[in-house]
Amino acid sequence: MLLFGLAGLFGKWIDLPAATIVFGRTAVAAAALGTAARALPAATRVRFEWRMAVNGAVLAVHWVAFFQAIQIAQCRDRAAGLRELSAVRAAARSRAVAARRRSR
């Protein structure tokens, strides 16, 4: 969970356009995946799938929008989002505890 939260902080701290940040992240991920793919035996490698490429493009658009939103948003907006998330988690936890008590 900590790593997911740090992505937003790095997006706020880095003074680069969102597309540049996403390109850097994508280049590092592509290099890591390419290295991992070369380590696989040839029999386990799969052919290129266009659906996966489209999925990757949609994910890249999502990340650009995410980093743009982080760079534009004020601290109070992010804090409100964290409060909402905490409230949702607390409600889910209380439901889970209640369900466990009922099942006993």
Image (spheres, grey):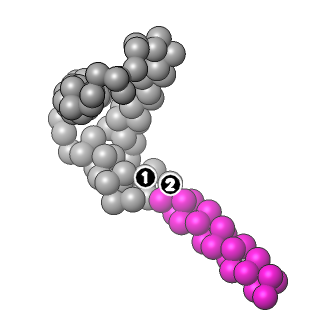
Identify residue for label 2. 81
Identify residue for label 1. 78
Give above or below for 88 relative to 16: below
Q: Which residue is depicted at the point 27% across and 31% down?
A: 40
- Estimate the x, y position of residue 14 in percent, counting from the top left: 19, 39
> Which quarter of the rendering shows the C terminus?
bottom right
Is residue 33 in view?
Answer: no
Q: Is 23 or 32 nearer to us in this picture?
A: 32
> How busy is the neighbourhood of tag 1: few (under 14 within 10 Å), some, or many (20 plus)?
few
- Magenta span: 82-104
Q: Is 51 or 23 nearer to us in this picture?
A: 51
- Estimate the x, y position of residue 30 in percent, counting from the top left: 25, 26
Give above or below for 73 relative to 97: above
Main secondary-structure element of the magenta-colored stretch:
helix
Q: Marks 1 and 2: CB-CB under 8 Å?
A: yes
Quadrant hosting residue 91: bottom right
> How busy is the neighbourhood of tag 2: few (under 14 within 10 Å), some, or many (20 plus)?
few
Q: Give the residue type that dot 2 points to.
A: Gly
Q: Give the residue type that dot 1 points to.
A: Arg
SS class, disc 1: helix
Q: Is 5 or 98 nearer to us in this picture?
A: 98
Q: Which residue is depicted at the point 76% across and 77% down?
A: 99
Q: Is residue 101 magenta?
A: yes
> Which quarter of the rendering shows the N terminus?
bottom left
Is residue 101 in view?
Answer: yes
